[in-house]
Amino acid sequence: MFLFLIFLVFTIIIIIGSHAFIGFSAVKFFSVPLGKKQFSVYAGLALLSFGFFASAVLLHWFQPSILKTAYYFFSLWTGLAINLILTFSLGWIIIAVFKTSNNGINLKGLGIFLVFLALVSSAYGFWNSGRIKVATVTAEMRDLPDDWSGKTAIQISDVHLGAINRASFAEKIVSLINKEGPDMVFITGDLFDGTCRDFKGLSAPLKRLSAPMGIYFITGNHETYSVLADIKAALSETPLIVQEDGITDLKGVQIAGINYPLEDLRKDISPVLNALDKTRPSILLYHEPVPGYAEEAKIAGVDLMLSGHTHAGQVWPVNFITSLVYKGLDYGLHKDGDFSLYTTSGAGTWGPPMRTTVRPEIVKIKFENLNY
C-alpha cells in the first residue's frame, strides 16, 4: 500500500506539472492576456488533466454510453497532451537558440506550427494504431519432437478489449489469426482492458478462433483490475484454455503458463519452473518480460519465453523508458544460448488509442529444431 501511495502521489505530480507546462506554454506562445482568458485556459486544462483517470475509475462501476464516450475523448486528449509537451519543449529550445543569436521570433507563428505538429503526430499515431502487422519469428528449440516439425503458433498480447477496443476489434484479430492458419495460439495477457464488464460480449468473437493444438491464455495485469471469476466464466464459453500456474504437455513440448500476480506484487515463479523437465523442450507464457524472471527461466531450461505488456512504449519517447526499465527486453526477439525471449508490441492500445513507436502486431512463430 505504501508503494502504491508513493506511485499515486508521483503520478498526480506528473499530471499536474505536465498540464501546467502546456498551459504556461500556450499562454506565452499565443499571448493570452491576464484575466478571464488565462483563467479559462488553466481551468480547461485542470479539467482535462484528471479526466482520463477519473473516467477509467468510474467505468469500473458504471457503464453508460456517455461515460465510455468521455473515456474515449480523454484518452485521445492524453495522447495529444504528450505530443504537445514534446512540441512545446521543442519550441522553448528554439526560443533559447534565437535569443542566443539575438534574432527575433514570431511567437504566435511558432505556436501555431507547434500545435499543428502535435496534431499531425497524434493523427499519425491514431492511424498507425490500426495497422496490425504479422511479425514472423523463428524459434529454435532443442530436441523438438517430430510432431512439431513444420508447426506454427500465433502469439497475441495486450488486445485490451474494453471501452475503446470493442467486439469488432476482437473480430478483426480473430480474422487475422485464422487467416494464418496456426496450429496453436498463445494469448499472453491483457486480453481485456478493465474498462468494461461485458466480458461475454467482448469475447464472443473468440469462439471462431481455430487452432487444432489448442488456444492457451494467461492473465496480465489488466485482468487483475477486473473480477477474474467473471472473466473465466466468459472465456469458458470459448475454446480458450485458461492456464493458471500450470504445465500442459503438448505433444512432447511443455507449455508453462503463469498468471499475473494480484495487485502488481512480484511473484515467485520457481514452483512452476522447478516442475519442468529439463530434458524436454518447454515454452513459458508470462505477461511481463521481467529480466529477473527471464534469467530464472533460462536457468530452469526454458527454451522460449513469450511476453507482452510493454507495448514497445506505444507513444514516443516512452519506448526509451520501457527499454531502460526492462533492460532492452521490452520488444523483439532476444537470444541467450539455448534460451529465447520474444516480447511483442501487442495488438491493441491502452490509454491513448495511438501508436507513434512500432506498429501493433500479432506474432507468427515458426519452430525449428536446434542442432549443434
Image: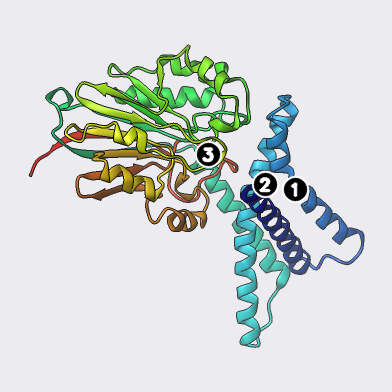
Tell me what residue is drawn at x 50 percent, y 47 percent. Answer: 314
- On screen, 83 above or below 146? below
Q: Is residue 340 visible?
A: no
Tell me what residue is drawn at x 56 percent, y 30 percent. Answer: 165
- Percent across and percent down for residue 111 are 69, 65
Q: Which mark is residue 48?
A: 1
Q: Earlier in the sequence, mark 1 or mark 2?
A: 1
Mark 2, other Cα within 10 Å: few <14 / some 14–19 / many ≥20: many
Q: Is residue 171 visible?
A: yes
Three-letter residue code for mark 1: Leu
Q: Quadrant of the C terminus?
A: top left
Tell me what residue is drawn at x 60 percent, y 32 percent. Answer: 225
Residue beneath disc 2: 77
- On screen, 263 above or below 211? below
Point out the frontmost of discs 2 and 3. 3
Q: Which mark is residue 349?
A: 3
Question: 292 or 126: which is nearer to us?
Answer: 292
- Percent across and percent down for residue 210 are 34, 17
State how far apart marks 2 and 3 are (Cα): 14 Å
In the image, is 183 to the left or to the right of 285?
A: left
Q: In the rendered image, which quarter is residue 10 located in? A: bottom right
Tell me what residue is drawn at x 33 percent, y 30 percent. Answer: 256
State how far apart marks 3 and 1 are (Cα): 20 Å
Q: Quadrant of the N terminus?
A: top right
